[in-house]
Amino acid sequence: MYKTVRDLTEDAERLNMTIGAFNMHNLEMLPDMIRAAKEMGAPIIIQTSVDTAKYIGYNVIVAVVEELANSMIVDVALHLDHAKDFDAIKDAIEAGYSSVMFDGSSLPFKENIEKTKLVGEYAHARGVSVEGELGTIGGTEEGVSLSEEDKEYTRPNDAVTFVRETGVDVLAVGIGTNHGQFKSKTNVKIPLLKEIHQVVDVPLVIHGGTGVKEEDYPDLINNGIRKFNVGTELLVNWTQQAKDCFAETPVNKSLRYNIIPANQKVKEIVKHKIGLFMNKNHPVNVG
Ligand code: 13P
């Protein structure tokens, strides 16, 4: 069924698990991403950048995701990732995305609050859930993370104010992760996450999931991470597999010989991650 991120993260809170939010990089990989969730018996969040949405078409993505969710009977939310521009958010909502992120993390605190609040009012009036971001999530090049001085970690007290003032459904936190980190792994600040989780009452989101050590997943989930973004790992593996196949396949052979193995790679990774995200060895939240 077609759901919002709010619906899915509420279930995740009750079950003390996290929902995998996987970036789709092309339309080809999408059916296998949702099939992976089906085979694991878990919900999934499919997310797109604004540029991917424009490249494929917002309406096309919505139509395909809804069709796959309904025909496969899987709970799926479709989320716009890192939108910095209100027009992109309006386009996504009009097309039927069930969730959007407004990324005001590079703005001054007050402006981030004001703009996120406006997005929240617009989206909530249309039944769409909203993710905000506070603190910076670094970017990386060649697996080398940003210097410590360039990072701004989420301050727990600011997070309380931000959530109260904006009304966001979920909050992305800066606790040491970096987007695009695939050659090395980061050291996430679990004590900081704990502090934030103790004072903030909305589900929390981890960005830059590719660079997070799998052994850290339980600590992250047990401290309130209910949406776990993974993008680069899918991109790198799809591309590498496709490159290997294209190198060997004669040019007049069906594209299926190159694309299906790449999609299969993505499916394996999504299944593996979802298995860990279900946090099976840890008790559910009661009461
Ligand atoms: P990675 O591409 O580093 O896994 O991060 C994904 C993400 O956080 C998307 O917003």
Image (cartoon, rainbow, N blue to C red):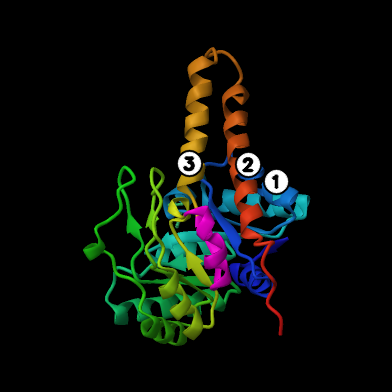
Residue 18 lies in what quarter of the image? bottom right
Q: Which residues are magenta?
A: 213-229
Which residue is label 1 attached to? 35
Q: Give the structural element (helix, strand or loop) at label 3.
A: helix
Mark 1 and mark 2 residues within 8 Å of each other at the beta carbon:
yes
Q: Nearer the viewer, residue 287 or 94?
A: 287
Compared with 209, 286 (above or below) is below
Which residue is depicted at the point 34% across and 45% down?
A: 143
Which residue is label 3 attached to? 235
Which residue is depicted at the point 25% across and 62% down?
A: 148
Compared with 134, 88 (above or below) is above
Alpha-carbon distance for marks 2 and 3?
12 Å
Which quadrant, please, contains the C terminus?
Answer: bottom right
| Residue 65 on the magenta span | no
Examine the rendering and report whether any part of residue 217 can be seen.
yes
Compared with 273, 205 (above or below) is below
Residue 139 lies in what quarter of the image? bottom left
Circle nearer the viewer, 1 or 2: 2
Examine the rendering and report whether any part of residue 94 can be seen.
no
Alpha-carbon distance for marks 3 and 1?
18 Å
Quadrant of picture, ligand 1: bottom left
Q: Amino acid at mark 2?
A: Lys
Q: Position of residue 66 (x, y in %)?
A: 68, 55
Q: Earlier in the sequence, mark 1 or mark 2?
A: 1
Mark 3 and mark 1 residues within 8 Å of each other at the beta carbon:
no
Which residue is depicted at the point 47% across and 55% down?
A: 209
